[in-house]
Image (cartoon, coloured by chain):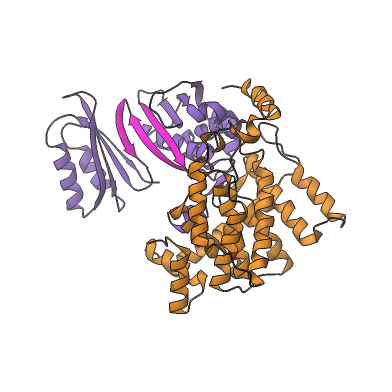
Chain colours: A orange, B purple
Amino acid sequence: MPFHSLGEIEKHSREEGKSFFEVILEDDINERKTTREESLNRMHTMWAAMLEAANSYDPELKSNSGLVGKNGAKMDEYQKKGKTLCGDFVSQVITQALQMGESNACMKRIVAAPTAGACGVLPAVLIPYYKRYQETSDAIVEALYVAAGIGQVIASRAFIAGAAGGCQAEIGSASAMAAGALCALRGGDTRQIISACGMALKNLLGLVCDPVAGLVEVPCVKRNVIGAMNALSCADMALAGIESAIPSDQVIDAMREVGEKMDVSLRETGMGGLAATPAGQEITKNLKSRKF
Amino acid sequence: MNIFDILGPIMVGPSSSHTAGAVKIGKVARMLLGAEPKHAWITLHGSFAATGAGHGTDKALIAGLLGMNPDDMRIPDSELIAEQQGLEYCFQTKYIRGAHPNTAVIRVDDGMGKEVNMQASSIGGGRIRVNGIDGIHVDFSAESPTLIVNNEDRPGHVAAVTSILAEADINIATLTLNRGKRGGKAIFVTETDLDIPSFVVEKISRIPGVLKVTYLNA
């Protein structure tokens, strides 16, 4: 049975003296009735696909609607001048998040993590980390298990789809997954990983899903940036020993409650929030003229 | 959901429901036809109709009809590939009462007498449910091995099919039977844990009163 709470994962980890990664890997082996080797190979495939997706970014491409594209290239150019407020590493994170979000909008191949709309968050933190710290792909793959284990608990206790629970369920979940993954990469223990995850989700609680014209473009691409930045800061806070005052499982439950209370116009219907602004409606009207 | 439902699928963007799921719907329609599609009439309902153009839902459905998978990099060029391979298609939008917001109806033929009419919905995360075949209600995901038996609505077919599966030591996960009108045509769908060998499928297709057997194994 996949874990229904982060508390259970912590309990297993503590009682069996295993890392978060080992607990999730063993659960996957049991759950899918597979071997350690097959599971690890499959996760390596996911990581390879993320790297390939990053490499295939096309700086000239615009989406079908023309709404997004080219901004990842702009950010890259600016960052290379060395004058960013955020510094090199964080600027690379921003660049990667934009590029992956744009690639997705432009029908390139990506890895949904946990969804296509939030596919930029995990690679945005993992790829620059992998390059800067010359990390092994084995270590990154272990961190991906941590991310997946967190996502699984969120999916089981709440939701990971914008239509079900708003953007907090997509970018929020991706951010919580990335925070845990980063914490694991930096040698954080299970408790710290869980704190990082809880804090990340808390910070994005209430975020609505309000895509203009219902497309995974505005504001989705840029929200991948905030998901990634939030993951970095929460991982650092957790590694500093800061804990979430509200236990992370209860944060997930709160996310569910908030999502359920969210008006349907704010859950991926393209009817509220940014989608309902005059500018958003103007864009929608212009796109509607392009019918089947 | 297993961990690779969370991290994954590897897919062509931008939307798991409007793109990846749409590719799967097209692919299942192709498999149900059991031949190279020549003409397709595609009806889009709900969010598929409203936002499909921007999500590439049209390209995705055609890609699926051409036999592509959701991670195929040629999906954005599927219209061109359809032209090269002689697949003609048209789209229309229509409100379908009671249907899931992301629903497509595909009527497809091979130009040589074979034709199938399928309704399916994309339910999120790239997963789909097929809800109708040739006007008869069905409900399956096409994720596990699935056997679809079109038969005359007469007693004994279910028993005949299940006993052949039992003989072959194949465990049934789900089983549903639906029919149009009494004594007319019925569709029997069973999802199994294990792959069904071709000789078993062959044997089932020889049961008297069985009109057609389709075996889907993605």
Residue farthest along the left direction in this orientation: B155
Question: Residue A259 appears at what percent x and percent y?
Answer: 51, 45
- Residue depicted at 47% across the width and 77% down the height: A14
Check the picture and name the quadrant holding the N terminus of chain B. bottom left
- Residue depicted at 52% across the width and 36% down the height: A263
The foreground one among B169 and A67 is: A67
Question: Residue B99 appears at what percent x and percent y?
Answer: 40, 29
Tell me which corner region of the image, top left, top right, bottom left or bottom right, holds residue B216: top left
Residue A8 versus residue B167 in the image, above or below: below
Which range of residues does the magenta coloring cover?
B116-143
Judge from the rendering whether residue B214 lies leftward or rightward of residue A270; answer left or right.
left
Whether residue A44 appears in magenta in the rendering, the answer is: no
Residue A280 versus residue B145 in the image, above or below: above
Whether residue B133 appears in magenta in the rendering, the answer is: yes
The foreground one among A29 and A3 is: A3
Judge from the rendering whether residue B44 lies leftward or rightward of residue A266; answer left or right.
left
- Residue depicted at 49% across the width and 59% down the height: A250
Tell me which corner region of the image, top left, top right, bottom left or bottom right, holds residue A241: bottom right
Q: Main secondary structure of the magenta part?
A: strand
State whether residue B180 appears in this view: yes
- Residue depicted at 48% across the width and 48% down the height: A257
Tell me which corner region of the image, top left, top right, bottom left or bottom right, holds residue A269: top right
Question: Residue B158 appears at what percent x and percent y?
Answer: 17, 39
